[in-house]
Image (cartoon, rainbow, N blue to C red):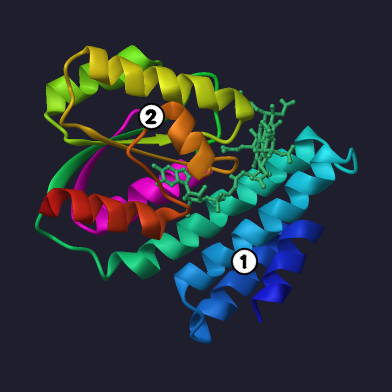
Amino acid sequence: MTQKLIDAITEMPEDDVLKLTNELLDGGTSPAEILGACKDAMEVIGKRFEQGECFIPELMLAGEMMTAISGVLKPRMAGEAASKKIGKIVLGTVQGDIHDIAKDIVGFMLDLNGFEVTDLGVDVPPAKFVDTVKETGAKIVGLSGFLTLAFDPMKDTVAALKSAGLNDVKVMIGGGQIDENIRQYTGADAYGKDAMAAVALAKDWVKE
Ligand code: B12
């Protein structure tokens, strides 16, 4: 069933995308499955872009569709929200990178699961993460990035937190190109493949 949604996103009639999303939800498809279909669709569009078969406007439209779908999913997921806050997290897309759809989903899921999230937005310099961790007393930092160019700013942010003496702060990273190798390169504590992984990591860390 979700294949229809993947086709609608990649073929781009935006009205169909929202209609289908609602139909799938009404038919019992979970928001997590819908997010999975969105990821697959973004892979298709990303590949087309790489191969010169589509251009920035199509990327932007895909981004807008993702934002619209998130808007539909959020109220459906909000019913499950935890009311008691269990920890603080500073989240942002690292310097030089402006991809924020995935970060917003991660922030939303963390918030739903009881974390107080300070979202610094996009293109966030390492010093801003350090300052905000000091101000909020957060013990977890989440770094998002989709560009190869995001690896070094991630590494710099981990290093900046360490040199500010914030050694008890755990850092998780995620985003399109990120994997375990990049985690090692950046010195982050963990890599999360999706928003659910971000929640699982954060919950583990607050238990410690
Ligand atoms: C939409 C999009 C855009 C939109 C972004 C809109 C927005 N507001 O975010 C726009 C059009 C602005 C854009 C711009 C560019 N883009 Co772009 N974009 C994409 C695209 C198609 C989808 C990204 C996305 O939002 N996916 C949807 C999310 C929901 O996917 P997801 O990965 O499943 O998300 C989960 C995980 O990533 C994880 N996660 C994410 N963050 C974090 C953080 C933590 C802590 C954790 C634990 C987990 C986690 O959880 C998420 C939720 O489950 C990708 C292709 C792709 N396949 O990723 C290219 C892509 C990322 N873009 C690319 C490029 C090149 C660019 C541009 C440089 C293009 C240009 N020439 O200008 C600019 C960059 C500008 C900049 N400085 O950042 C390349 C990057 C290549 C590279 N190796 O660096 C890609 C891969 C396309 C490609 N195949 O070439 N882009």
- Is 164 a magenta residue? no
Residue plotted at (79% across, 47% down): 47
Front residue of this view, candidates 22 and 94: 94
**Residue 85 in sight:** no
Residue plotted at (81% across, 59% down): 11
Q: Is residue 8 left or right of residue 188?
A: right
Residue plotted at (44% across, 25% down): 154
Q: Quadrant of residue 23?
A: bottom right
Disc 2 marks which amino acid?
A: Gly
Q: Nearer the viewer, mark 1 or mark 2?
A: 2
Q: Is residue 206 left or right of residue 172?
A: left
Q: Is residue 88 left or right of residue 75?
A: left
Give the labeled residue for mark 2.
187
Residue 189 horizontal/vertical position (percent): 32, 38
* Element assignment for label 1: helix
**Residues shaded magenta:** 101-120
Residue 133 horizontal/vertical position (percent): 20, 25
Give the labeled residue for mark 1.
37
- The quadrant of the rendering that contains the N terminus is bottom right
**Residue 61 in sight:** yes
Whether the residue carrying mark 1 lies under 8 Å from ligand 1 is answered with: no
- Is 102 a magenta residue? yes
Residue 121 horizontal/vertical position (percent): 40, 29
Position of 136 relative to 35 (above/below): above
Disc 1 marks which amino acid?
A: Ala
* Element assignment for label 2: loop
Q: Main secondary structure of the magenta part?
A: helix
Which quadrant does ligand 1 occupy? top right
At label 1, counting other C-alpha atoms closer than 10 Å, the crowd grade (few under 14, some 14-19, many 20 or more) is many
Residue 18 horizontal/vertical position (percent): 61, 65
Residue plotted at (47% across, 69% down): 32
